[in-house]
Amino acid sequence: MFSIIQAAGWPIWPLLLASIIAVALILERLVALRRSKVVPPALLQRVVAEYRQNGVSAALVGNLEAHSPLGRVLGAGLRNVGSSRDIMREAIEEAGGVVAHDLARYLTTLGTIASISPLMGLFGTVVGMIEIFGSQSPGGSNPIQLAHGISVALYNTGFGLLIAIPSMIFWRHFRALVDSFIVEMQQQAVRLVEVLHGERKD
C-alpha cells in the first residue's frame, strides 16, 4: 500500500485526507441516522397515553425533547397544548426545521467530497502528464521518469474515483433517509395536533 502511495506522488495526499474524512462522516451518519434513534416506534402513542393520563408537565416535555429528534418535534407541540391549532403547528414547524438541519449535518461535506474527488484525481493526472512530458528530451526520454509520470496519472485518477463513488452513494442514501424521516415526523406531529384538539381519537 505504501509503495502505491509513493508511486502516486504528492497529489495523492489530499485524496487520502478526503478519504479519511469521508469514511469518518459515513460511519458517524450511519450511527446517527438509525430509524430507532430518530423516529422511535410507538413514541406518539406513548405520548398521547401519558398526556391523557397525567396531562402536560415540564418533566414530560423535557424527557420527550431529550429522547429523540421526533421527541423534540412532539415536545414543541405539547409545550403549546393550551394554544390554538395554528400556534401549535407553527411551534412544531419551527422545531422541525431545527431537527431537519441537525439530521442533515455533515451531508454537505460528504457531498462536496464526492464532487471534488474526481477533480482532485484529475489534478493528479495533470501533474503526472506534466512529468511525462518533462521526461522528454532531445536525446530521448527518461524511462524511470516516464514510468513515474504514468503512475502518478493513473493512481490519482483511480483513487479519486474510488473515493467519489461510495461517497456519492452514501450521500444520496442519507439524503433520502433524512427526507423520509422528515415526512414521517410531519405526519406524526399532525396526528398529535389533531388528537390534542379532539379531532382524532388516536
Image (cartoon, rainbow, N blue to C red):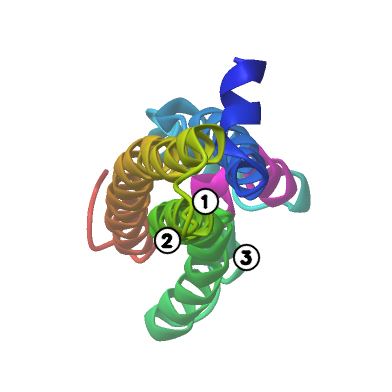
Can the viewer see residue 53 in this picture?
Answer: no
Q: Picture coordinates of residue 178 (x, y %)?
A: 37, 50
Q: Nearer the viewer, residue 194 or 185?
A: 185
**How many residues crowd mark 2 within 10 Å: few (<14), some (14–19), many (20+)?**
some
Q: How far apart are marks 2 and 3 (CA)?
A: 49 Å
Which region is colored magenta? 60-73
Secondary element under disc 3, as helix, strand or loop, is: helix
Q: Is residue 182 left or right of residue 33?
A: left
**Image check: 191 left or right of 125?**
left
Instruction: Name the residue: 50% across, 71% down.
Output: 97
Task: Give percent across and percent down for residue 38.
Answer: 48, 39
Q: In which quarter of the image is residue 182?
A: bottom left
Q: Residue at label 2?
A: 119
| Quarter of the figure with residue 6 | top right
Which residue in the structure is indicated by mark 1? 135
What is the three-letter code of the residue carrying label 1? Ser
Q: Is residue 83 left or right of residue 2?
A: left
Tell me the element at label 1.
loop
- Tell whether label 1 touches label 2 (CB within 8 Å): no
Earlier along the polypeptide chain: callout 1 or callout 3? 3
Disc 3 residue type? Arg
- Residue at label 3? 79
Residue in view at x 44 percent, y 82 percent:
84
Taking the magenta stretch, the answer to whether it contains residue 70 is yes
Instruction: Please report the residue visible at 62 percent of the width from the left and 18 percent of the height from the top.
Output: 3
Where residue 61 appears, as percent x and y from the top left, is 67, 51
